[in-house]
Amino acid sequence: RADRADRADRADRADRDGPEPTAKVTRLPTANARPSPPVASPAESKQVETSQVEQVEQIEPIEQAAPSQVEQVAPPGQEEAHRATDKDLLNIVVVAAECAPWSKTGGLGDVVGALPKFLAQRGHRVMVVAPRYKGYEDVWETGVRHRVRVMGQDHEYGYFHACVDGVDFVFVDHSCYMSFGDDIYGGSRQDLQFRCALLSKAALEAPKVVPCGGTVYGDESLVFIANDWHTALLPVYLNAHYRDYGQMVFARSVFVIHNIAHQGRAPMDELNNLEIPDNYTELFRLYDPIGGEHMNVLKAGLNQSHRVVAVSNGYAWECQTPEGGWGLDGVVRDVNWKLRGVVNGIDINDWNPAVDVHLESDGYQRYSVDNYREGKAACKAALQRELGLPVNPDVPMLGFIGRLDYQKGVDLIVDNYEWLMSEGVQLVLLGSGRDDLEGMLRDMENRNNDKCRAWVGFSVATAHRITAAADILLMPSRFEPCGLNQLYAMEYGTVPVVHAVGGLRDTVQPFNPYENSGTGWTFECADSGAFQRALGDALYTFRSHRDSFEGLQERGMRQDLSWQNAAALYEDILIEAKYQH
């Protein structure tokens, strides 16, 4: 009960005081049978169009660039997969509240910064739309200004643009984003609703009006990829404000679940602020037996999108369970015909020990699978010197990198602290979060400053160096939709010990000493005892069976963990959406 209360408290605070759904969900017809639009005369239709988006500055007509002419015929079988051909090249618009390296609070920013580049390599024309939180360098104003109605008032905004690695990165310029540049999810619940609604509306207009490379994207073969609840309004707006009135009728939307715990919950009367037609109201309604009826933005987005992606196969399954669905498990089960799991990849231009810019000085050394023993030994010694720990190649070094909160299972590390110190390991932790956990980390270092180092805060360089230097990476997360740190660790020859949930279960294969297979250690139950047993096995193998431990390292490094495989799977899903009625 204490764990459940803690989870609910954090989810509520993340959604700006919205109550936590705990049980029954009002279910509506899913698929993509949208609510019937109200009957409107041609004059009324024109009025709706101009009230939603009004252009401020007249732009000369620009020739629309379409990837190709595609026969709009649905394939036999709604869920049949299509392989990309010349006819299947797409205009793709990825929309998210953050995009690395310009803005990032977690894995979402990494995904949005990397996946589009690999989709572009496959021949598609790709745009990313995200807020402009600060005055980014090498990002240029397009001169395109628009006005949209958000929360009952007209607001003018603009677009900035940069082309990087064949991808058009477009940033929505409005003072509401600049005001929260250092806390992109900060402010009141209404503040966040405003920013999310504006982003979704601006993203829908971007392919029509932003001349990237001299030509706009247009709406032919157009697929939007919305990410998490911050952009869950986009599939609704696409249908309610455009397709229901004969605009962008061939455009499609795909929704990606990165973390279903955050849903955009709010009192139902706040739906009036979001310009939602009356016939779409029930899509947002959720019944919570504790707090009553509430608005749920994520629920509507799942219903209205043409395809849904979870960031791992395991997480796709967990979202359909009462324990993992956070009150929306029934909704996800209803739309599971259009749900697929795709594990994230890593950007090997950034996370690659052979080219890592953070390993080229201070005694660190770049390495590959061919010389990882020497390379990791040099990095371990360099980190020990940098942190003031005894330089000893034989002592097991354990690393943790992540947020200090309940989800990441940091308390399980704290619970096993005394045992770990008695085992003679070196423990290096990097992260920030809850004040009580930050204090515990500082206390752990003070009590054994020759064995433990806690860096409260975050440093990109230190994260790379810990990943390269550590022998074992700790990831005792209670839930982990996909996880990236375990992928980084295996790429760097660092063996992960993980709780077998979500993407961790999908990506880390348990060590089998009899078959000499696997890439790490897993434990099934998120308690300190199970975690300790898995750690004990890892430490025993490191000390007594080094050849088996090195086999784990090599198998991890020889995997293809890049975005290439994930991009091919996303491509299939996008094409399925394109052909969907």
Image: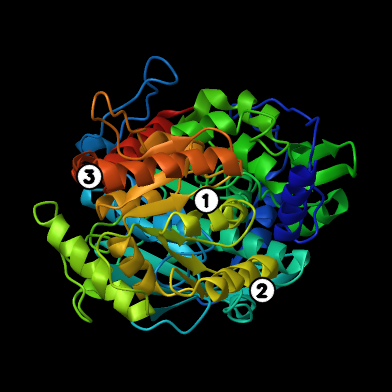
**Front-most of residues 263 and 52:** 263
CA separation in Å, label 3 and label 1: 42 Å
Residue appearing at x 75%, y 60% in the figure: 13
Amino acid under disc 2: His
Label 3 Cα crowd, 10 Å radius (few <14 / some 14-19 / many 20+): few
Q: Position of residue 19 (x, y in %)?
A: 82, 50
Label 1, on which residue? 227
Q: Position of residue 501 (x, y in %)?
A: 51, 37
Give the numbered dot on residue 155. 2
CA separation in Å, label 2 and label 3: 63 Å
**Front-most of residues 541 and 106:** 541
**Front-most of residues 253 and 546:** 546
Instruction: Classify mark 3: helix, strand or loop.
Output: helix
Q: Quadrant of residue 356?
A: bottom left
Quadrant of the image containing the N terminus:
top right
Residue appearing at x 24%, y 40% in the figure: 545
Residue appearing at x 66%, y 35% in the figure: 325
Label 3, on which residue? 546
